[in-house]
Image (cartoon, rainbow, N blue to C red):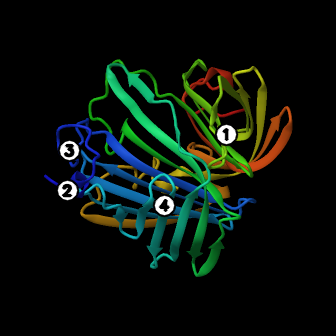
Amino acid sequence: MITKGDDYPLHQTPEPVAYTGANRNFYDRFFFNGYCPDGSVFFAAAMGIYPYLNILDGAFSVVLDGVQHNVYGSRVLHMERLDTQVGPISVEIQQPLRVLTLRCDDGENGVRADLTFTARCEVQEEPRFTRRSGSQMVMDSTRMTQHGSWSGWIEIKGKRIQVHESDYRGTRDRSWGIRGVGESDSQPNPESGPAQFYWLWAPLNFDDRATLYHLNDDAEGRAWNSNGVITPLLDHGDSERMVRVFSELTFFSGRRHAKSALITFEREDGEIITIELATEWNFYMRGIGYTHPEWRHGTYHGELATGYDEFVVSDVGASDLHVQAFCQAKMHMPDAELSGQGVLEQLILGPHKPSGFDGLLDMAP
């Protein structure tokens, strides 16, 4: 089947763009977050395209006055990968790698937004994520991440918030490849190990630069994917990749969520940079479909379906593990100290020896 995408030089296989050439778990995803300096307004969005499953879904979420408002949409893709709208939610690429627009128009539930992301820094390609469970490839993906500023407006239950580029910053990413989407495999691999996933991701914005850190550990605390980058503002030089990165977390009692974190960067010349993160509250990723019991990424809801829910952030229980904690950041360099904001994304499931976790869901003392 020939679609709009075939008019662009985007082919990766001899097939038309409509056919992915990979397995059922192939996905292609947008993610965005944005916030004001004190974190009193926070929003995030996701949109996923699943060519093999022939589904597109998306979500838009805003935290205001301690309540997280979440709008969901899912539809049949009809193999048109360039139609990036689902129900009230849309993503529009105005200028590739520079300017994108995110919109939500859910009048029924009082959630509306028209927001434009403008790049502050160049896109960063993260190291490829590759992970097997027994004989099965469960993750094989590439991701690019970019820091930026936001302009436009948000409206929640009739309350209009003006979003000014001078005040609102955030991060977007694009990832694509293979990871579990849609319904779970009906016949799990007999040699797969116990459930375990340790994930940290900390994109941070400072006035004159940005930083990016991530870590995947195995149960023993051995990193199988990690990255640390300092990136200047656009047209102010090249990004600097660290030769070694690591982090130390202090957890809230009775939870697997970090109270604080210390990230260490080591430069090629041996110079050490540390970043202190003080977490203030959690944005719950289920509000944009991650592990959501109904709106899980890639699930089939018919030709078109939309949904909405809301919850008080402080009321969410400890077992909701996947969060982006809004953070104030302090960066300590030999010649400067910088203050900024960002998030510490965390998903810590199963054992992790350095954290003192032995089982699937045991919590910090």
Q: Nearer the viewer, mark 1 or mark 3?
A: 3
Disc 1 and disc 2: Cα gap in Å?
Answer: 48 Å
Q: Nearer the viewer, mark 4 or mark 1?
A: 4
**Mark 1 closeness class: few <14, some 14–19, many ≥20 residues within 10 Å:** some
Mark 2 highlights which residue? 3
At numbered mark 1, what does the secondary structure look like: helix, strand or loop? loop
- Assign the C terminus to one quadrant of the image: top right
Q: Which of pointers 3 and 2 lies earlier in the amino acid sequence?
A: 2
Mark 4 highlights which residue? 100
Disc 4 and disc 2: Cα gap in Å?
Answer: 23 Å
Q: Which of pointers 4 and 2 lies earlier in the amino acid sequence?
A: 2
Mark 3 highlights which residue? 19
Disc 4 and disc 3: Cα gap in Å?
Answer: 26 Å
User: Could you say which is closer to the camera, residue 357 or residue 178?
Assistant: 178
Question: Residue 141 got which mark?
Answer: none
Q: Is residue 284 visible?
A: yes
Q: Which of pointers 1 and 2 lies earlier in the amino acid sequence?
A: 2
User: Could you say which is closer to the camera, residue 312 or residue 231?
Assistant: 231
Check disc 2 and give the amino acid type: Thr
x and y, in percent, of residue 113 in the image:
52, 72
Question: Residue 255 got which mark?
Answer: 1
**Mark 3 closeness class: few <14, some 14–19, many ≥20 residues within 10 Å:** some
x and y, in percent, of residue 11 in the image:
25, 43
Check disc 3 and give the amino acid type: Tyr
Asked whether disc 3 touches disc 2, contact meaning CB atoms under 8 Å apart, the reply is no
306 lies left or right of 44: left
Disc 4 and disc 1: Cα gap in Å?
Answer: 36 Å
Relative to residue 208, is residue 126 depicted above or below? Answer: above
Q: Residue at x 45, y 78 (%)?
A: 108
Check disc 1 and give the amino acid type: Arg
